[in-house]
Amino acid sequence: MADADPTEPLGRVPLHDAHVALGARIVPFAGYEMPVQYRDGIIAEHGWTRDKAGLFDVSHMGQARIVAADHEAAARFLETLVPADILHLKPGQQRYTQLLNEQGGILDDLMVARPADPALDGTLILVVNAGCKEHDYRHIEALLTQGVALIRDDDRALLALQGPAAESVLSRLAPQAAEMAFMTVRPLDIGGIAANVSRSGYTGEDGYEISVAAADAARLWERLLADADVKPIGLGARDSLRLEAGLPLYGHDINQETSPVEANLTWSIQRRRREEGGFPGQVRILDEIARGPLRRRVGLLPEGRQPAREGAEIRTRDGQLVGEVTSGGFGPTVGGPIAMGYVVSEFAGIDTALDLIVRGRAVPARVVALPFTPHRYRR
């Protein structure tokens, strides 16, 4: 996530007053005043999401649309910016991809959805990171071709309902929610509130992201929290949940120097794009796919109880510097410290023994497969 300008006043999401009323601790985050935790605390919120259903306000994220004459025109434009196959997105399907620079580095990672409604053929829905959205929009607008427009949806809020009870909770208000598969999108009437819903999320759990008009956000928030299986969850638990799920955070695990291949996101570049190219940085990215990158993002499991934080050096047991931790902390579900970072590819194999340098002391660790906690998406 890009750092917000400290000279700019912080924004407030439509649900700001609701968070304060629930006793949330509010902190600056990506240019907004956001709830980092509520009264129960991060560990309890993390566990509730793994066991029941957590409700997150992620309205700081950027929501926008690419609009063209038809799907092919919109898709072919977006494919000049991202490496995913957008052309073959089916109606009602969503895909994860990255906005790339000419060197193959990641300007942002984002979700792209093709609406299910035939009347919206030619529209692609984008959800981008909060700290990057202004830069993203300027970047896209500077490259727009004739007949293609970018429309910002700043008047919308975004809620995420995540956890094993998410389906039962949402389907009590909108029965069609139970029919949705992972990474699909559809409009839903949620107890009289019009919403655009995707079955996806950032926790590794089954769940939904729900886009509604900002004016309807408080009513939907209250309606979902009225269910005994739902509690509000702050950004602190969102971070520990995504770390256990092995999901990268922009500005930490991925950035403008990182390629999708280094980041172990090659799966998000479909076969057609690998064969045809046509995206920024393709020379570097296709070479890394063919020959392997110089470094890779890996999971790291430290011994003992001492967590290794972002910036900690990663060394071989004989002291050779081979990488750096990009995310680290305590994994409540794992029951101990976990971390992710980049290491020279030679040392990226599972069970490779390494040292993490924490406060000048070498903490033994080993490379492990990601995720730390199994994903429970509904495939």
Image (cartoon, rainbow, N blue to C red):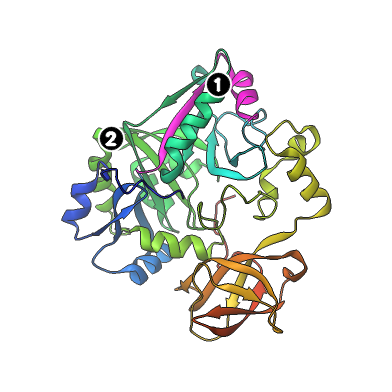
For residue 46, say whether it is visible: yes
Give the image quarter of residue 286. Answer: top right
* Vertical side of 95 occupied by 267: above or below: below
Residue 259 lies within the magenta run? no
Q: Where does the magenta region start and end?
A: 60-80
Q: Amino acid at mark 1?
A: Leu
Give the camera-side residue of 77 and 362: 362
Residue drawn 28% across and 33% down?
A: 192
Q: Secondary structure at mark 1?
A: loop
Q: Amino acid at mark 2?
A: Ala
Q: Position of residue 4 (x, y in %)?
A: 37, 47
Dot 1 crowding, Cα within 10 Å, few <14, some 14–19, many 20+: some
Residue ranking furthest to the right: 291
In the picture, the disc for residue 223 is none
Q: Position of residue 317 (x, y in %)?
A: 69, 83
In the picture, the disc for residue 214 is 2
* Vertical side of 362 occupied by 70: above or below: above
Q: Is residue 160 left or right of residue 98?
A: left
Q: Earlier in the sequence, mark 1 or mark 2?
A: 1
* Vertical side of 93 occupied by 226: above or below: below
Q: Secondary structure at mark 2?
A: helix
Residue ranking furthest to the left: 21
Residue drawn 50% across and 67% down?
A: 310
Q: Is residue 316 left or right of residue 379?
A: right
Q: Position of residue 344 (x, y in %)?
A: 72, 65
Residue drawn 59% across and 73% down?
A: 313
Q: Position of residue 249 (x, y in %)?
A: 51, 55
Residue 77 lies within the magenta run? yes
Please name the residue that numbered disc 1 is placed on.
144
